[in-house]
Amino acid sequence: HVKPQQIISSLLFLSSNDKVLYYECCTSSTSLQDFAILDEDWFKEVASCVFSQHCKRQITNRRLSSLSQSSSMDESSPMLQSMEIARKTEQYKDSNSSAPYHVDHISQLWDVLSNCAAINAKDSDTMWHREAFIRTAVEKAYPTTQLDYEEQSKAIFSYLRCLLVHHGVFVPVSINASENDGASPSTAFLLPSLFHEIPSNVWSYKTRDAWKTTLSHSWLFHDVVLPPSHLMPRIMATVLKDVANYVSSEDAMLEVAYFNCWKSAFFLELDLITLQATTGQRTRSRVKLFAHLDTADSNRCVASDTMTDSMYRLAVSAKGNIGFGGRKVWEGGYDLVLRSVEGVVNDYMSQHGQDCGEVEREIVCPNCLALHHHNVAATVNRHDVLAKRNDGVRTIRCRRGCPLDSAMLCGIAGRGADETLLPLSSLVSHENSVRPSKLAKDLMGGVVLIGLWDGDEKKIISAGTGFIADRKQGLVITASHVLMEMKSGHKEFGRDYFGLKNGKAVIGVIPRSSDGSRSSKAVFRYFAEIIAKDVEHMDAYVLRITSRMKEDVGGQGEGCGDQPETSLVKGEGLTQLKMNQKFAIEELVRILGYNQGGEGLFEKGGYIYRALDVMRGYVSSEFVNDIRVNMVGEEGLGSDGQMASTSLRREPVLVGIFNPTKETVVLCPTIPGHNGGPCVNLNGEVIGILIRADQEESERCHLAPASELEVLMEKARDV
């Protein structure tokens, strides 16, 4: 008598040599029912049906024909569902609803997979039904049954799908049914063998906008013996399942905007829906995610300079709004995706740990990603960051010395449930700060109040701040949007004085009294004209003072238009502020400006504030909008990790679109009216002018740096 265990051992041996198929059931112990004894060539033909061009055309034709038969449409048709979800989503976006639109689970799944190589159970049934050799096998399996062919094939086709899933030919993606519709889960099958190679231009770690950042978490696999070939399809399926299930829930504030996948990577775009507390209006914040598995010799691989040939890196990156510690990035799906990936990696290691050594979870420095090539970006150990965060350490540094916010690096996992992400500027101790060598009272003569005079309305309709950059030529620098339209795509974009027929610039200065001291308020004294600007690349322009009013004008400037203009005299007494192109991260700075917030000009019924105030902060980062090719060029990387000159290119900027070349980011409280005001260091030197505050975090401010202003000044001096 042969013992059952001997038979099982023999079958395991045969399965290892591909003579029979071992199908692992959910039972705790191996039994004879775990094995399928099939003709090897027959099963290969079954699997190859999925990848034939003939069968793919059959699927497409079936879906298209279902659309043409409006009276008998199959509601589970993926093509129909994809079109229906698009129609409903557009209807929803045009409505005034304050809640996100949630589609049913089947439509959501097929809308997400519209760009991927994927099929459903009906697709596979359609393919197999049309194959004569499969029909013959099914009929032989039921020689005496009265059931028709459709009923006979159900069990066999279901079993074949299970075998294909087990061997990685099919990768299932299941979405749970909603609690209310009572439907069964929807399942699609990814087809990894049909995935294409990843395009070279699908992702960049750089960002065009200074208010955005790129976060990147990675799993570094050490001492890999066998390439983790089935890991990425499993990750894609799990991420799709978790995201689609979350989006389908009633309280979800996420929407899937786009998904695509390749052999070793996937790209996902999610929209975070937020409701404004005051107006109830909904706003969208898009988060772009990219995950890929690469070796050290890949140009796509992040932080590859520290890897060896036996290592693989799985990087999951997200690009979105940097405000409040990147909260919208984390809440916009990044935390959800990272938890999905972590679960798959842990499960993979428990099953295939013998094929590689340890796995190390690392976080890539976002500052390195912004300033250097991603191949040489520094990394920090995630466990160490969490430990320091738990010890109350807010700021850490990468090996390049970049200061990093531990809360932003770790996101939701890095803070307690009741903890809020305070702006970093709140950590600056104003009482203990170094005393500036030049105080604000020494600089106020060079900081001017700029108004837009409307000759038809006979009043100043907007106000901002600027500074005197050349006292001999009477040149003043301020932010462009103080006197012109800077909204990208606006029909009046770049037009001086917002297109006003009788608009002109008026300049206010803080006068000296008879004893030489400065007054507390500015008075309008000069008229000026715009002589230099670069609206596509810089929110700044240069004014030249052209004439002086016969009398200084106070109040709301309502008398400016009635003042006779007189010629400028030599020695007008203008005070010039010096510019300095050099600055350091974490350098203490001050922003000077004329506050128009509160009850100021920008509030209904407000009036022009002519008193100068000062806000303090520090330099946070530098933004350079060079669109860099994420592949090493002929000259490769420089010694500092910067891209070589042959690897740089700048994409052309469309007319009417504001796309800044450089910006400096400072953390400093600001108020409306400060725009155009100088940001000065402790020596009173201008390192840039304020052009805007972050749309999410008002204390994160953006400057047009002195290096760009100097270029504009050279242009102005030639006029």
Image (tube, rainbow, N blue to C red):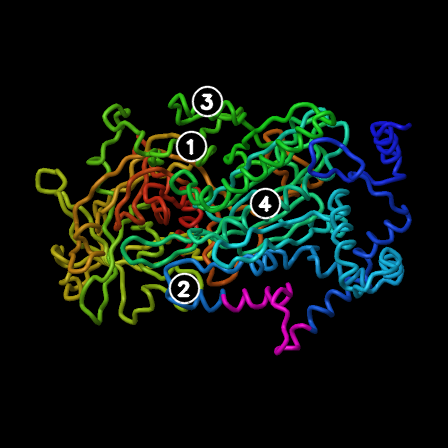
Q: Are marks 2 and 4 in contact (CB under 8 Å)?
A: no
Q: For marks 3 and 2, give the one nearer the viewer.
A: 3
How far apart marks 4 and 1 lie (CA) works out to 24 Å
Residue extent of the magenta highlight: 66-88
* Three-letter code, disc 2: Phe
Q: Nearer the viewer, residue 715 or 93?
A: 93
Q: Give the residue pinned by disc 4.
A: 239
The mark found on residue 493 in the picture is: 2
| Number of other residues with Cα within 10 Å of mark 3, as a class: few under 14, some 14 to 19, many 20 or more | few
Q: Nearer the viewer, residue 215 or 63?
A: 63
For the image shown, how many numbered marks are present on the structure? 4
Name which residue lies at 46% across and 69% down: 91
How far apart marks 4 and 3 lie (CA) works out to 27 Å
* Three-letter code, disc 4: Val
Image coordinates for residue 497, horizontal then vertical, percent: 31, 64
Image coordinates for residue 671, horizontal then vertical, percent: 26, 46
Q: Nearer the viewer, residue 488 or 686?
A: 488
Quadrant for the C terminus in the image: bottom left
* Three-letter code, disc 3: Ala
Quadrant for the N terminus in the image: top right
Q: Give the residue pinned by disc 3.
A: 387
Of marks 1 and 3, which one's residue comes earlier in the chain? 3
Q: Secondary structure at mark 2?
A: loop
